[in-house]
Amino acid sequence: MAAAKSCAPGNEKTWMNKQKDQLKQNNYPRVLEELEAFLEADTIESPNAPVRACYRYIKNRPRQLDYKAALAQGLPIGSGEIESAHRYVIQQRLKLPGAWWTADNPDTMLALRIIRANEKWDEYWNQQRQAA
């Protein structure tokens, strides 16, 4: 949204929605073209320029921007579900009052919680029994 303020002052939401639609169609080169017209100077005084930061982020991640395929598979493309899962899968268990962990334990425990959250609990334990 910071880049939208520089690229379309007063019309940020419309401009942003247009760019989102382009990304959902895997047309990230068009988004880069839109941003190019508003790129700030690349100087020491502007290392966090919002348009340049957005441009660099998109340009450096073309293989991670296959939103069209993700949407076709019913996968989420936003970070909201991940942030939510972080709270109830990870933090809920790790932040119990009085709990403490050795360095080796959290990864194994979290792997089991993820299996459970993904509704693969029975499948996992059936595989464990077959392997034994």
Image (cartoon, rainbow, N blue to C red):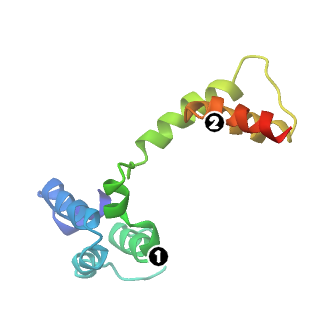
- Tell which of 16 and 49 is nearer to you: 16
* x, y percent for residue 47: 47, 73
For the point 62% across and 25% down, which residue is it?
92
Depicted 110 relative to depicted 27: above or below: above
Q: Amino acid at mark 1?
A: Asn
- Few, some or many C-alpha atoms within 10 Å of disc 1 (few <14, some 14-19, many ≥20)? few
Residue 58 appears anywhere in the view: yes
For the point 85% across and 41% down, which residue is it?
103
* x, y percent for residue 87: 55, 31
Q: Quadrant of the C terminus?
A: top right
Numbered circle sitting on residue 115: 2
* x, y percent for residue 19: 22, 65
Residue 14, located in which quarter of the rendered image? bottom left
The residue carrying mark 1 is 60
Residue 6 horizontal side relative to residue 57, left or right: left
Residue 23 horizontal side relative to residue 58, left or right: left
* x, y percent for residue 88: 56, 28
Do the residues under discs 1 and 2 have CB atoms within 8 angstroms? no
